[in-house]
Image (tube, rainbow, N blue to C red):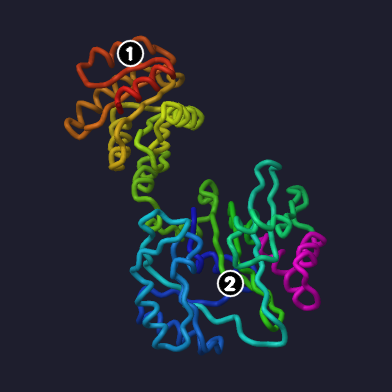
């Protein structure tokens, strides 16, 4: 579950991480009031207006602006709230901005130059360990840094038996070229950041940039956070941070009815039971020369009601030109699935306007194929992978 920057900063602050302070606003009027409050609390004269969407690269898309007075706060907030912000991490049409974060200016003059760093905490699945990835090249896309200057990216792997050790936090501060008070601040920052990652059951904390201020303080200027969905049952306060306006509406609807659905860019809809078979089915579609329109796992049951619900979810995508149903009958019998498909097709009437290909394998597969073939419905049946791929080609040719 992704959350907004201001929510990520709330979590960080609760674990003792120094953050760029800010107040969220839903309108230009609220933004001006937030700016006045920030000035009273922090003394900041300038304010940063930051669009709150679940995507990176907001600055490049015009979603982060500096306001030097209250009039600019109002004007820039009015420009940003309601805009369709396009970044490399949004859909082509962009994402609508519903709120902004009015933040303090932390790039004030002082005894030394400011410095920006990159830091993230995430799981290294290859080694089954958490990892801190960091770089001196903050404020830039980490992908660009990795491609052009990979030697400037450092990693610190955490032994799960003992957790983050003090020498590791000190090594991070040293590799970032810090000394004096900034060194001590970075050590504390790293330790608190890792505690926030563990304590919130996150799957990722990305801070870009981590700022060394001109008076040698270390703080998080941004926060991109993903909370592990599987842990939300024990993190109710974070579950309430979910903003469904930022999520794909079809995926939200599918989740509410218990379907595992991920929207993709292709034209062949998939209805499968089991994640492994779903992945293989998407490979099958690509092998046939097409692209999958979705990942949809109906789970261990596939009765008429569940199949009908899955049909309706898939058909909400206007790009779908055909639907491939690929079910392995282990726990559920193939003939019951076939009957469910036929009944669902009848119930939906003329709502299904695309070809349906059904591949059933497992218990009672032969009976299932007969049910499909004798149903009188325009449904193409198959029992083998290659046969299903050929049927997809026929349906879309």
As drawn, which residue projects farthest toward the right?
167
Q: Which mark is residue 195?
A: none
Tell me which segment is drawn in magenta: 166-195
Q: Which secondary structure is most common in the magenta stretch?
A: helix
Residue 33, horizontal then vertical, whole percent:
41, 84
Q: Which mark is residue 221?
A: 2
Local SS, label 1: helix
The C terminus lies in quadrant? top left
Is residue 203 a member of the stretch shown in magenta? no
Q: Does 329 sit above or below residue 77?
A: above
In which quadrant of the rendered view does residue 182 lie? bottom right
Residue placed at 58% from the left, 61% from the top?
Answer: 141
Frontmost residue, 326 versus 274? 326
Residue 355, horizontal then vertical, whole percent:
27, 27
Which is more N-terminal, label 2 or label 1? Answer: 2
In which quadrant of the rendered view does residue 351 lie? top left
Position of 97 compared to 194: left or right?
left
Residue linked to disc 1 = 369
Is residue 176 a member of the stretch shown in magenta? yes
Residue placed at 58% from the left, 72% from the top?
Answer: 221
Position of 374 compared to 384: left or right?
left
Residue placed at 26% from the left, 21% from the top?
Answer: 379
Residue placed at 34% from the left, 50% from the top?
Answer: 249
Residue 62, horizontal then vertical, whole percent:
44, 70
Q: Does 160 sit above or below residue 121?
A: above
Local SS, label 2: loop
How far is the residue under mark 1 from the one under mark 2? 59 Å
Q: Residues within 10 Å of mark 1 (few under 14, many from 20)?
A: many
As drawn, which residue projects farthest toward the left?
350
In which quadrant of the rendered view does residue 246 lie? bottom left
Q: Residues within 10 Å of mark 2 (few under 14, many from 20)?
A: many
Cβ–Cβ below 8 Å for labels 1 and 2? no
């Amino acid at each position: 579950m992704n959350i907004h920057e201001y929510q990520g900063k709330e979590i960080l602050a609760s674990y003792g991480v120094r953050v760029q302070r800010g107040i969220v606003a839903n309108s230009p009027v609220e933004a001006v009031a937030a700016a006045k409050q920030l000035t009273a609390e922090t003394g900041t004269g300038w304010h940063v207006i930051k669009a709150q969407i679940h995507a990176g690269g907001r600055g490049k898309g015009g979603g982060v602006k500096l306001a030097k007075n209250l009039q600019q706060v109002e004007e820039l907030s009015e420009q940003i709230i309601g805009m369709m912000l396009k970044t490399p991490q949004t859909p082509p049409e962009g994402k609508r901005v519903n709120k902004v974060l009015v933040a303090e200016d932390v790039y004030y003059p002082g005894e030394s130059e400011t410095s920006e760093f990159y830091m993230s905490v995430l799981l290294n699945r290859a080694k089954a360990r958490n990892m801190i990835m960091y770089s001196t090249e903050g404020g830039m896309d980490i992908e660009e840094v990795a491609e052009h200057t990979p030697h400037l990216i450092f990693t610190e792997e955490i032994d799960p038996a003992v957790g983050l050790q003090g020498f590791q936090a000190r090594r991070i501060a040293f590799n970032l070229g810090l000394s004096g008070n900034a060194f001590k601040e970075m050590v504390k920052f790293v330790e608190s950041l890792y505690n926030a990652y563990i304590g919130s059951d996150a799957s990722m904390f990305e801070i870009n940039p981590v700022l060394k201020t001109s008076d040698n303080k270390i703080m998080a200027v941004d926060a991109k956070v993903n909370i592990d969905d599987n842990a939300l049952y024990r993190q109710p306060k974070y579950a309430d941070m979910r903003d469904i306006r930022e999520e794909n509406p079809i995926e939200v609807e599918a989740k509410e009815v218990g379907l595992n659905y991920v929207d993709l860019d292709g034209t062949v809809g998939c209805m499968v039971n089991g994640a492994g078979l779903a992945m293989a089915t998407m490979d099958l579609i690509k092998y046939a020369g097409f692209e999958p329109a979705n990942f949809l796992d109906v789970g261990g049951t596939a009765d008429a009601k569940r199949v009908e619900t899955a049909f309706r979810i898939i058909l909400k995508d206007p790009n779908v030109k055909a639907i491939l149903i690929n079910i392995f009958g282990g726990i559920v019998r193939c003939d019951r699935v076939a009957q469910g498909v036929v009944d669902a097709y009848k119930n939906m009437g003329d709502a299904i306007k695309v070809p349906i290909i059904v591949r059933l394998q497992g218990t009672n597969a032969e009976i299932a194929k007969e049910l499909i073939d004798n149903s009188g419905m325009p449904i193409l049946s198959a029992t083998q992978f290659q046969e299903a791929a050929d049927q997809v080609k026929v349906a879309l040719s």
